[in-house]
Image: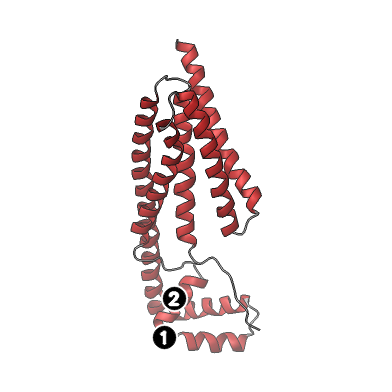
């Protein structure tokens, strides 16, 4: 009988998609909703929305790139430190290897045997310490670039979805109603599949993502209309 294990292997990619798409659906929608309560021309909303999407796409992508570079630089720094430690204090490092095996219930004889075998290959020794002592996995060398493109692209796509409603309607209020319907559906579908992929309850996750987006949009709309009435 064949046993198939299903594990999420592209967690970094999924995380970037979630970050970009969730913000892309929420922020431009909230901006458009706020402007809908303060202006009378869809052109203003479309122009402001596109400007926000471009700026947000660049900012989110740059944030993803910097985070990816930081992760890689941190790993390389710790890797160099571990290589230095196995050279200068090998006895201490061997003891740390034994402590790792001890946590898995291996007796003293087994710990010594495994530690000595591992120490014969310096690279595997250091890789073992990086993973089991420090809890660090080697990032993909293109992690920063891929993260920037994924987050920025997801934000761009997510931001265009609520904004398209204002292109095909005549007034901001009609655009807002259409945009709310489109965005609610997109948030629910996105939240459903995101939760399904990450092992959460799909409907609960979908409702959570949808409610956050709608609350943000409602708050923006109320603030904009409130200030418009205050100063008009």
Rendered residue at 45%/11% (across/down): 231
Identify the image quadrant of the N terminus: bottom right
121 or 90: nearer the eye? 121
Rendered residue at 52%/39% (across/down): 183
In the rendered image, the vertical position of residue 228 relative to residue 114, given as above or below = above
140 or 229: nearer the eye? 229
In the rendered image, the vertical position of residue 227 relative to residue 108, given as above or below = above
Q: Secondary structure at mark 2?
A: helix
How far across and down, in percent of the image, does residue 103 sit?
62, 75
Q: Residue furthest top?
A: 232
Q: Which residue is mark 1?
A: 121
Q: Secondary structure at mark 1?
A: loop
Q: Which residue is mark 2?
A: 127
How far across and down, in percent of the image, does residue 10 sit?
48, 64
How far across and down, in percent of the image, does residue 111 sit?
58, 84
User: How crowded is the residue under tag 2: few (<14 C-alpha within 10 Å), some, or many (20+)?
Assistant: some
Rendered residue at 41%/85% (across/down): 121
Q: CA distance from mark 1 to mark 2?
A: 10 Å
Residue 160: quarter of image: top left
User: How crowded is the residue under tag 1: few (<14 C-alpha within 10 Å), some, or many (20+)?
Assistant: few
Q: Which mark is residue 27?
A: none
By what rule are the colours in the image chosen? secondary structure
In the image, is 191 to the left or to the right of 227? Answer: right
């Amino acid at each position: 009988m064949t046993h198939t294990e299903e594990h999420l292997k592209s967690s970094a990619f999924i995380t970037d998609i979630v970050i970009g798409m969730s913000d892309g659906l929420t922020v431009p929608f909230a901006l458009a909703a706020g402007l809908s309560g303060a202006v009378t021309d869809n052109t203003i909303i479309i122009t402001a929305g596109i400007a926000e999407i471009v700026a947000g796409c660049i900012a989110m992508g740059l944030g993803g790139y910097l985070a990816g570079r930081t992760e890689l630089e941190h790993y390389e720094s710790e890797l160099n430190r571990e290589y230095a430690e196995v050279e200068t204090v090998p006895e201490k490092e061997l003891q740390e290897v034994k402590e790792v095996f001890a946590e898995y219930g291996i007796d003293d004889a087994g710990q010594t045997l495994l530690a000595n075998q591992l120490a014969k290959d310096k690279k595997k020794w250091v890789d073992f310490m990086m993973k089991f002592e420090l809890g660090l996995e080697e990032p993909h060398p293109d992690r920063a670039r891929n993260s920037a493109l994924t987050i920025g692209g997801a934000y761009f796509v997510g931001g265009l979805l609520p904004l398209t409603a204002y292109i095909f309607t005549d007034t901001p209020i009609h655009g807002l109603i259409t945009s709310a319907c489109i965005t609610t559906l997109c948030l629910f579908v996105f939240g459903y599949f995101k939760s399904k992929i990450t092992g959460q309850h799909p409907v609960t996750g979908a409702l959570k993502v949808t409610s956050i987006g709608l609350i943000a949009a409602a708050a923006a709309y109320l603030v904009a209309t409130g200030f418009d009435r205050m100063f008009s």
